[in-house]
Structure formats: C-alpha cells, structure tokens
Image: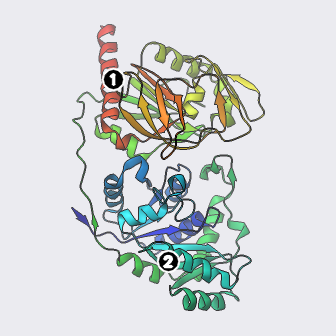
Amino acid sequence: MQAHIPRLLVAAPGSGSGKTSVVCGMLRALAARGLCLRAAKCGPDYLDPLFTERVLNTPSCNLDPFLAGPELVRELAATQGQGADLLLIEGVMGYYDGIAHTHESSSYDVARITNTPVVLVVDARGKALSVAAEVRGFLEFRAPSQIAGVILNHVSEGYYPRLRSLVESEAGVPVLGYLPHLEEAALPSRHLGLVRPAEVEDLERRLDALERVVRKTVDLDALLDVARQAPALAYEPQSLPPAVANSPVIAVARDEAFCFYYHSTLRLLEQLGARLAFFSPLRDACLPAGTCGLYLGGGYPELHARKLSGNESMREGIRASIAAGMPTIAECGGFLYLHGTLEDKDRHPWPMVSALEGSAFATSRLGTFGYATLTAKHDSLLCDAGATLAAHEFHYWGNTNAGDSFCAQKPYAAKTWDCVIATPTLHAGFPHLYLRSAPQAALRFVHACAAFGKARKENAL
C-alpha cells in the first residue's frame, strides 16, 4: 500500500539542541492555522511524546526500528499520519546516533526507512563558520542524508542573517529559520528525562512563548513545502491474530506515578478484544469493577512512594488479585511497586504491594540501560520457552530480586543478564516491552485475562 503523507523529521546533532522546544513551537504555530497535525517520536522515549500530545490533544506514537522493525515503523507512520496535513516526527539523541555506535535505530534510520525529509536543529551558541562546517559534515556523512533544511537555535535576531548566509553558501542547504535563547520557554528535566507536562509550572505560558517566537522567526510555509514534497510512503499492513469475544477488563494504572505506556500497545490490547479501565494507585481505593487483568506501566513510583504506601486498600487489593492468579504485566516502575518496600529519593523505605519478594532501592547511577532482546527460559504468561521479546531498560532504582525467567542480550554486544519474574499469570521486570511488535504475546495476555474472568464468574455462581 501507499500513503501520501506530508511529513518532516526534526533532528539535531546531539541531545540538548532544542528539538522538543522547536517541535512544540512549530506544532502550536501550525495548529493556529487550522491544520490537522499529528506527531511521532523516534526511539523508545515516553516523555517527549507527552508534550506533543499536550499541544495537539491527540496521542503521539513511537517509531523505533529496534522495537518494531522497519515494516511496522512504516505502517505506524502511515497510520499516524493518515488524513493529516502534516506528520511531524521528533528525532532522538544525535541524528546518526544508533545502536552500538552504528546508525541503526537512529533518527537517520527512521528518516531513511520512512523516506522522510529532515530539518536539522543546530545549536549555534559560541559558533560562527563552524556551524556551516557542522551542517556540511552531517549532509555528507551518509548519502542521501535526508536533510532538506536547517533551523538555527540560540541565535540573536541581529546575527541570524549573516549566519544564515554562511550556512547556505558553505553547506548548500536552505536555512528555514531560527530561535533566540528563550529562558522563559525552557522545559525542565530530571533523572529520567523531561519533567511530565502536568508537572511543569505555567506550561501554557511557556508554549505560548514558543509559538509567538516560531511564528516570527521560522518560515512555516517553507517547512510545509518541504513536507509536501515527501514521496509516497510504501508499507504493508500487518495482520493481527484473532481477537477474543468476551472483552475482558484490563485495569491500567495511569497517574503521576505510572505514566509510561505506548499508545500502540494499549490500542493493540483493545483491538484484540480487551476493554481498558484506567485507575490511579495513588488515589483510587480499589481496582475498577470487573477487572480481569492488570497492567502496571513504568513511571515515577519512587517520587510518590509515601502516597502509594499510604493507599493500603489499593496495595492489598492488588496483592490479593495477583495471589489469586490475575494475569499481570508490571514494567519497571510497576515492577518496583510490587516489591515489599520501595525507597524514595531520600532513601526512606516505604511498604509497597508485597506481591514479590525483595526490596527496591535508590542507586547512584543509571542501571542496565538501552535495548535488549529477551529470550524466555521457560513457558510463562507472555510466551513459551525460547521465544524472544524486544525491550529496553532505563532506570536509576535497583532491587534485590530482578528475576531470572528471561535472558537479556544487548545488541552487537556479548553482555547478557538474567531478568524478569515470570509465571503462568505474571510478567514483572525492569524491561519495558513493545507488545505491538509481539502481537502473539499480547494475545496470550488477553486470553489469560478472559480465562481468569470466566473462571471467576463460574466460581461466583
């Protein structure tokens, strides 16, 4: 199939160049024109998409070649951009930075796979002619580079015309605008990345400031022209396994403590027949009525440990449900929540669900980090022995019982480690899963939830 989707990928030479700010400002400015806009994010990041979702009030999606594979990346891009005037894709890290010092699963890889033109955001602070050298290097490093334009960040209005002329004459690529230094529009960060939009003080004022500046300093018409020149996106829709008929209710934890989910995974569970019921382990007294399965995603339970601990009825309800065999997926933060205790950022331990043995504690460094392929050592909730799942890890908290049901292997590296506590009804561990690329695993979970719900009803008769 082919989809004609105007699209752009906003990339940068490195992290911290201002990609998210530029993307949010562009989306706000273009939305004010009444355009239908959609957004996507390269890589596995959960946080950056929350900002574009806040701007557009519509879900973003992740385009990750390692987690999804090239064919699914193309399908996801086509589906996300269907009917839109523009699909704006935010890059990750440096443009060519991928797995194990290659360009695999980099922003460039996504641009290449989806044949998307790229706008490179270059931080020009403390530079002059070197900006042109930097841009030219990126243009020539791979052929084709996909780079169709440049936006200069942290440039004054007075200096911009001269710097623009230098870049265009020396590098031979159009400069489509600039952003001055905007302290009032800065987006704050913490240990796992950007702070969630809901926690950013006066976020609307910051976004308003970005929009005002982008309208003045970026050639939005030129950007749209570049996007409209993107060739048709060729893709093959992937077939999904048959859905269950009795619509089991899967309770999904979603609040300030648990907020890391892929929309494509949640959508897949619905496509397979599940009904999702969102709840808050921070505030709700019990699981939603009729719950047959439980999904505890990642997030920041360590920042809310005291409040999570204080909600004893929820902790006891989840513990009893897991003990009764309710099918459960718990990833990273959700995994920490199931331990006996969890330390907060001040290293104070708080009682948690106690569905798992062991304690979770703060560490002084980033734990196992990056992509991994998980191979099942035995049959369990999501897959049989020998099956594999694509995953990634990113956490600063550790624990005394990481599990040994799967063996994790880093790509292009000899490093392996055991992880995940898995039983016929439980999958709990630090790795974040991308179930859209493993629909059979998602179907096993939905089937298990349906069977649990059916058995509970029969026992109640």
- 183 on left or right of 410: right
Of the image marks 2 and 1, the number of the one nearer the N terminus: 2
* Quarter of the image with the N terminus in it: bottom left
- Amino acid type, mark 1: Ala
Q: Position of residue 125 (x, y in %)?
A: 71, 75
Residue identifier under label 1: 448
Q: Is residue 277 above or below residue 2?
A: above
- Amino acid type, mark 2: Glu
Q: Residue visible at 47% across and 70% down?
A: 31
Q: Position of residue 261 (x, y in %)?
A: 48, 42
Mark 2 crowdedness (10 Å alpha carbons): few <14, some 14-19, many ≥20: few
Q: Residue visible at 54% across and 79% down?
A: 150
- 150 on left or right of 237: right
Residue lying farthest front? Answer: 414
Q: Position of residue 103 (x, y in %)?
A: 48, 60
Decide which of 3, 148 is in the foreground and name it: 148
Q: Is residue 422 visible?
A: yes
Q: CA distance from mark 2 to mark 1?
A: 52 Å
Q: Quadrant of residue 104?
A: bottom left
